[in-house]
Structures are given as structure tokens and as C-alpha cells.
């Protein structure tokens, strides 16, 4: 028996998220079906986490066990030949049988992109959130600073989040203007459901002058989801990398 670790890139536009579910086509489903075709046996992928419908990834990590002795290139080049154009295996390596993509992950890097221009962009529409009004980047940067560290992020999670604890540690949160895009990078040890999207929505409202940058510590202490910013739309979010 061997375990294969996959690093996966995908455009989540046409999928109901990562995890297999009965009411929609998912990334996990497409990869498992392609692996089953290749290996001639059912395959169960275990991932480093989940992404919601419409969310993208550059570096989702997943692993599976198999007794088949195919070369590693079969699980990258060969598997890519079976997958649709919006899903690709970037890398396939041997991993110890004890490797657990979720439990062994040390941290994750997410990126949220805002397209900040008056006119809409057909090319950016599936990978960013279009906001027309000017954003105050310095205010957003000041607010981002308050998220760094270990905090209770109860005010920054979805109402149906099932996490047992809402305490998480963020190592860095940065806001950078790049042409017509505003890039929000968040690096942390773990995340709650919709946490990055709510942080992005809150920072956007700070940039619009709707929330004061110095209000963020109070939002964290309050645990009140209704007091924090909106949940930014899914297409602007991308899982960049999982660190082990």
C-alpha cells in the first residue's frame, strides 16, 4: 500500500465546492471519479480542508491510498488527461502512510482579490469581487493589523459553522493595491467557515468608510457576527498554499 499526496489547482466557478455532496458536482467528486477510471477501483480523497462553491485554489492538498504501482507521473500528467480543463494536478508525490492532509497542516495562505474600478471587467469577473467606489487602502491596512495574533473569531464565521472552538491564530494579514486590484493576503494556522470572506468584507467596509479601523478589536471581543462586515462573494477567494 502507498499514499499519494496531490497538490491541486482549480477554478471553482462551475462547482458546488470541494466536498462531495448529493446536490451538485464538486471538485473532490471529479478527481475521485478520474482516479477510479485510472486505477480501476474506488478511491477516497482526504483533503487539507474544504472550499465553498465558487472558491478557487492554487494549492489544495489531498491524499489517497492505493496498492497500484503506477509511476508518479500517472497521477499528474495521466490524471490531468482525464480531468476537465478547470481542474489540474500540479504535483504528485509519495507520502508516508501516516500522513494526514488536514491534521498535519501547519498553516494556510488565502488570497482575496477585489477588482476596484468604475467599469466592470469580463476577465476579472470570475476571480474577483467588483467594487466601484474608491477604497482607502491605508485604512484597510490599519484595520488588517488588528486581526494578526490569536483571537476569538466568532464574529467572523458563518452561522452554520460547526467548529468546536472559534479561537484561531493569524500570522499575517496584508492589503496591497496592485493596479485596479486590491489584494488581501491572509496567513493563519486555521480558519472558520467563511472567515476569510468575512474579514475581506469587513476590510472592504473599512475602505469605504463604513467601519472604523479601530473598531476591529471590539468586533473580535464582541463575538457578534451581525456587527462585523458582510461576507464577500466567493469568486474573489483563492486557497494559495497549505504548509506542512
Image (cartoon, rainbow, N blue to C red):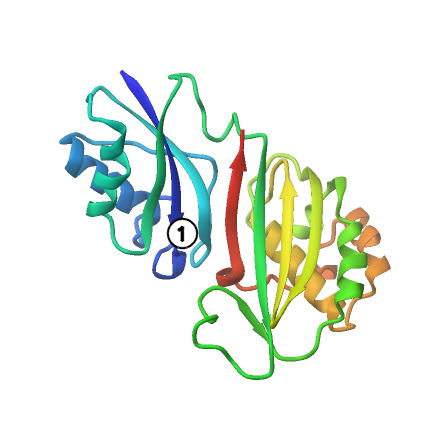
Is 192 left or right of 44, judged from the image as shown?
right
Does any portion of residue 159 appear in the rendered image? no
Q: Residue at x 64, y 64 (%)?
A: 230
Residue toward you, 165 or 208: 208
Image x and y of residue 43, in percent:
25, 31
Q: Give the answer, above or below, for where 68 lies relative to 132.
A: above
Q: Residue at x 67, y 51 (%)?
A: 156
Residue toward you, 23 or 239: 239
Residue toward you, 117 or 200: 117
Q: Give the answer, above or below, for where 74 lies relative to 197.
A: above
Q: Residue at x 64, y 48 (%)?
A: 186
Image x and y of residue 146, in percent:
80, 50
Count up the numbered dots. 1
The residue labelled by disc 1 is 17
Residue toward you, 140 or 21: 140
Task: Give the farthest residue toward the right.
Answer: 214
Q: Give the answer, above or below, for where 73 lies relative to 24.
A: above
Task: Give the farthest residue toward the left.
Answer: 40
Does any portion of residue 94 appear in the rendered image? yes
Residue 130, by quadrant, is: bottom right
Amino acid at each position: 500500500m502507498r499514499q499519494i499526496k496531490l497538490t491541486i489547482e482549480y477554478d471553482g466557478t462551475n462547482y458546488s465546492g470541494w466536498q462531495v455532496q448529493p446536490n451538485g458536482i464538486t471538485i473532490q467528486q471529479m478527481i475521485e471519479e478520474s482516479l477510479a477510471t485510472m486505477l480501476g477501483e474506488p478511491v477516497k480523497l482526504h483533503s487539507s480542508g474544504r472550499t465553498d462553491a465558487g472558491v478557487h485554489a492554487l494549492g489544495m492538498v489531498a491524499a489517497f491510498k492505493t496498492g497500484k504501482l503506477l509511476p508518479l507521473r500517472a497521477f499528474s500528467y495521466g490524471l490531468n488527461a482525464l480531468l476537465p480543463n478547470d481542474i489540474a494536478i500540479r504535483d504528485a508525490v509519495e507520502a508516508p502512510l501516516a500522513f494526514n492532509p488536514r491534521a498535519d497542516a501547519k498553516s494556510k495562505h488565502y488570497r482575496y482579490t477585489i477588482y476596484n474600478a468604475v467599469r466592470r471587467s469580463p476577465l476579472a469577473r470570475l476571480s474577483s469581487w467588483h467594487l466601484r467606489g474608491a477604497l482607502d487602502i491605508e485604512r484597510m491596512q490599519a484595520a488588517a493589523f488588528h486581526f494578526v495574533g490569536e483571537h476569538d473569531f466568532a464574529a467572523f464565521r458563518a452561522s452554520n459553522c460547526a467548529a468546536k472552538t472559534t479561537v484561531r491564530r493569524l500570522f499575517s494579514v496584508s492589503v496591497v493595491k496592485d493596479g485596479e486590484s486590491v489584494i488581501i493576503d491572509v496567513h493563519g494556522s486555521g480558519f472558520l467557515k467563511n472567515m476569510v470572506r468575512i474579514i475581506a468584507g469587513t476590510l472592504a467596509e473599512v475602505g469605504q468608510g463604513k467601519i472604523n479601523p479601530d473598531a476591529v478589536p471590539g468586533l473580535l471581543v464582541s463575538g457578534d457576527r451581525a456587527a462585523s462586515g458582510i461576507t464577500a462573494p466567493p469568486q474573489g477567494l483563492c486557497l494559495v498554499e497549505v504548509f506542512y
